[in-house]
Image (cartoon, rainbow, N blue to C red):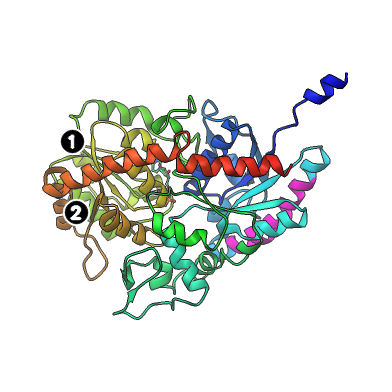
Amino acid sequence: MAEQHKTKKPPPPHVLLFPFPSQGHINPLIQFAKRLQSKGVKTTLVTTIFTSNSILSNHSHTTIPIESISDGFDHGGSAAAGSSEIYLESFREVGSKSLADLIRKLQSGGTTINAIVYDSFMSWSLDVAMEFGIDGGAFLTQACAVNNIYYHVYKGMLSIPPPDSSRVSVPGLPELEYWETPSFVHNPGPYPTWSHIVFNQFSNFHQTRWVFSNTFYKLEQQVIEWMKTLWPLRVVGPTIPSMYLDRRLEDDNDYGFNLIKPNHSECMEWLNDKPKGSVVYVAFGSYGELGPEQMEEVAWGLNDSELNFLWVVRASEEEKLPKGFMDRKSEKGLVVAWCRQLEVLSHESVGCFVTHCGFNSTLEAISLGVPVIAMPQWTDQITNAKCLEDIWGVGIRVKRDEKGIVRRVNLVSCIEAIMEGEQGVVARRNAKKWRDLTIEAVAEGGSSDKDIDAFVSDLNHSH
Ligand code: UDP
């Protein structure tokens, strides 16, 4: 008996992961959870009731249990709130109580919680974790470059908006034109609640045990080194399904939780018919919206370009397509409401990616070695686009006119430059280099793998 007692293994540490409830924030936390699971950690995803009811889960890709909490809008989510101000306030207030109730419920059922890894957009989660004496880890889903700029605003070291003619200088980054900073910095007026959230995500970092970032060391080396002097930063990205990178997690070939149903077979059948490198893939993410005029310019630009295109237009955006565009759609163009972006980007027919430069799309392009045409809209996308073109060298930014609209001629000339010109050759070469470095980062013993191991070791030692 005594012998048996000695060899009994302790239960694995258990981590709750709590993403902001949108596709671009759920994906990285799910992938982080899968990596933790593969290293023997028990993980539970916490999301809102509305999100959990909307998730079209493909459970062959994940075995992560889900627990739900209320954000105050169980039946319609943020859309039902009417404004992001109302939603975010309700999420903070109702979400805090509901998260505390969940922790109580789990603990009284005998479940140990060793850490809560929460999206840094919901810094209030740390207050809840601390109420229960649980260690918290903030997860930054955006680039360190972007967070570095936000941090400087938070500390009062960068004024907002920066004066028009000024250049912005922060450690670890080349000088930026004022308009290359995130929109909340150079145009802080329109979304005061979002601005408040992004600037104040650091307010309680001195109380977190860990700060995680979905980037990788070589991608943002100088910024990361600077940030490591501030916080216990663990750089654990990119959080792309393993089968696209190091292939260590068998069957991990999809994020596994879609909020919109992908038109998968239609996309694949169409792509399979196209010559290698011939397709322009166009997608602007899960959240942002193009204005009607912009939508029209993109549509006619793709039409004029003579190249094949696959364009994701979410159902809510479809009515902005110009009249007649869908009818004139030919063999060369396919418009779908959603796709499995990773499968599309890794398809050999795809030659470039016209992207809004959300950080997941940015990392996916880099990880899969696909050159980009950057068409950022707002928030961090503008700075990501700068990095994609000028720092990482994997694409070009398309110019806007004085109204802020990307005209069709500009889009067409960027497409030609990347698909057929010298700029495309250079971007493809650099993209391939980044792909190799990405795989190196997440492979066994790579920089991101080591940072995940360090976290697991912390968990194992403190529990
Ligand atoms: N995505 C997808 N199918 C699509 C368009 C996007 O699966 O048709 C995924 C994409 O792979 C990425 C996420 O949705 O992981 C979007 O995140 P991102 O940070 O790029 O943009 P956001 O939606 O947050 O603006």
The kind of residue on which mark 2 rests is Leu
Residues drawn in magenta = 88-104
Which residue corresponds to the image point at 28% horizontal and 50% vertical from the top-left?
321
Label 1 to label 2, Cα distance in Å?
A: 16 Å
Residue occupied by mark 2:
411
Marks 1 and 2, the one that precedes in the sequence: 1
Indicate the quadrant of ligand 1 in the picture: top left
Residue occupied by mark 1:
278
Q: Judge by depth and name the residue closer to the eye, 262 or 281.
A: 281
Question: For the N terminus, which image quadrant?
Answer: top right
Determine if the C-beta at disc 2 is less than 8 A from ligand 1.
no
- Disc 1 secondary structure class: loop
Q: Is residue 42 left or right of residue 316?
A: right
Which residue corresponds to the image point at 61% horizontal and 62% vertical from the top-left?
205
Give the crowd class for mark 1: few <14, some 14-19, many >=20 residues within 10 Å: some
Question: Can you give x and y, in whole percent of width and height, for residue 94 in the image?
Answer: 69, 57
Q: Judge by depth and name the residue closer to the eye, 408 or 239.
A: 239
Q: Is residue 98 magenta?
A: yes
Q: Which quadrant would residue 71 be assigned to in this image?
A: bottom right
Question: Can you give x and y, in whole percent of width and height, for residue 18 in the image?
Answer: 61, 48
